[in-house]
Amino acid sequence: MTEGVGASPDARSAEAWRAFGVRLREWRRRAGLTQAQVGARVGYDHTAISKLEHGTRKTPLPLARRLDELLTADGELVGACEAAQARGPGVADEDGADARRAAATARTGPLPGEPAGGDLLSMLPPDAELPARLPAYGLVCPVHGGDGCAVPALDDAVALHTAFCALGPAAVTSPPLDTDTLHALTALLALCLRADEEHAWAQAAVVVERTLHAMLRWMTLPAAAYQRQLAPLAAEYAQSAGCLRMLRGRHATAMAWLDRSLLWAGPAGHVGTEVAALSDMSTLARLEGDAPSALSYGDAIRRAAAGRDWAAAMSDLYLARGHAMRGDTWQTLRHIAYARARSDRIGHQGEGEAPWLSVASVRLRVETGAAGALRDLAAVTGDRRLALRAVEAGRDALSLLTPDMRSARALLLVRMADAHACARDPQAAIAIARPVLDTAEAAASALIGRELRGLLGRLDAGHTGPPENDEFARRLAAVVR
């Protein structure tokens, strides 16, 4: 069916995406590039580019911008993408089936209860300061994307947030959702993610989860625009809620929020959020001692972002950690090698899909994860050489940290100390770990606490050394028990 007055919204959308595909193919050929060459330069497999050119796959606007820039299309591809998105059923049929499906997705399954809380300003981390512009802290505006936009002042953002959360659960009307509110919600999430201390994590979690419950109320209103505008941001909020819960040792609630993040991120086409949520789910499974699930979630990362080196590196990293739990030396070392090789090839092509990603951050994640996997493997196998390799990976990761990453530094130092303990060098372990016990991070994060308990168990198992070793073990036990 050709586009016309009698055409259905689905038919008009399909025709618009075919028109985009025709333009994409024309510009690609003008540039003298193959589908494989285009795909490699924007971080996609050549089969994905083929689907885009045939109009059988919708093109996310950030990708259209990269394609337009790569092929020097002078805005034509961006315009065609925006026109195709405007033809989608979500616009042409706001009060019809598309809105009902999105509302049903918003309501799927029970969620953790809405936390009580007082004034927003009293719940924000100390010395709260919003970023002046978006993107910030790995978050982009759901309206303006990577193009950037200004953020309201803190007092205005608080007022906008209060009005947004005031929508009652029985609301049936559709109040306007202005862009300033979306800017404020995104900037507030960036502020919450900067929380470093335990009490700040707890307060940030309250802000994030209260906002999530408000988003659910908005997304069940009869206006599909709310689902389209809020679902990507809600996916980010839910992934952050899961991460904040995990930092506090609340694993069951963390998994509930991460599952909801996947539910919203997939249809919204936010691959970066999917990868982040799956990574956290793999970590949760590992913390529960569930190697098969840790491996399953790690493998799902690769499938969620097929053809992307940055996602493949993350997948290999979490597969390495899952295999280390089983004592599988060959598989662990193989996936660590793959993760490092892929991180060397990343460049900057993934940052449009995963704004939290940078070349440095991927390398930091890989070396941090390698240190953990090698330490876990050494603990299972008793291989001292693996423990020393874990220490080396930890040193490499430390060199990539910035001064403000205090919790990450404490985690790495304890992990390196534990690796020394696995290498049967308690004196080196104590020398590295002792300063960490003087920091707030030692008792703040459940993840650091878990590392400290592992170190304590290995030091207790040795039962040898000078009296100061026993003194340190007693002090360590007082922190973690």
Image (spheres, rainbow, N blue to C red):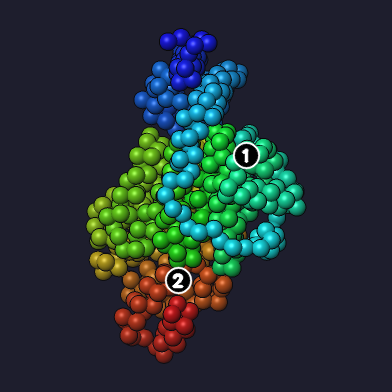
Residue 139 shown left or right of residue 383 in the figure = right
Between 394 and 201, which is closer to the camera in this rendering? 201
Residue 37 x, y percent position in the rendering: 42, 24
Q: Which mark is residue 341?
A: none
Residue 328 x, y percent position in the rendering: 24, 57
Which residue is outermost to the bottom? 467
Q: Quadrant of residue 430?
A: bottom left
Pointer 2: residues within 10 angstroms few (<14), some, or many (20+)? many
Residue 9 shown left or right of residue 459 in the figure = right
Q: Which mark is residue 449?
A: 2
Residue 370 x, y percent position in the rendering: 38, 56
Quadrant including the N terminus: top left
Q: Amino acid at mark 2?
A: Gly
Q: Amino acid at mark 1?
A: Thr
Residue 281 shown left or right of residue 349 in the figure = left
Q: Is residue 222 above or below residue 93?
A: below
Pointer 1: residues within 10 angstroms few (<14), some, or many (20+)? few
Q: Is residue 57 above or below residue 352?
A: above
State which mark lies toward you, 2 or 1.
1
- The local secondary structure at tag 1 comes to loop
Q: Are marks 2 and 1 in contact (CB under 8 Å)?
A: no
**Which residue does the image show at 50% across and 45% down from the upper left?**
235
Q: CA distance from mark 2 to mark 1?
A: 47 Å
Mark 1 — residue? 173
Number of callouts: 2
Between 98 and 287, which is closer to the camera in this rendering? 98
- The local secondary structure at tag 2 comes to helix
Q: Quadrant of residue 229?
A: top right
Quadrant including the C terminus: bottom left
Mark 2 or 1 closer to N-term?
Answer: 1
**Which residue does the image show at 32% across and 81% down from the upper left?**
462
**Which residue does the image show at 41% across and 61% down from the upper left?**
252
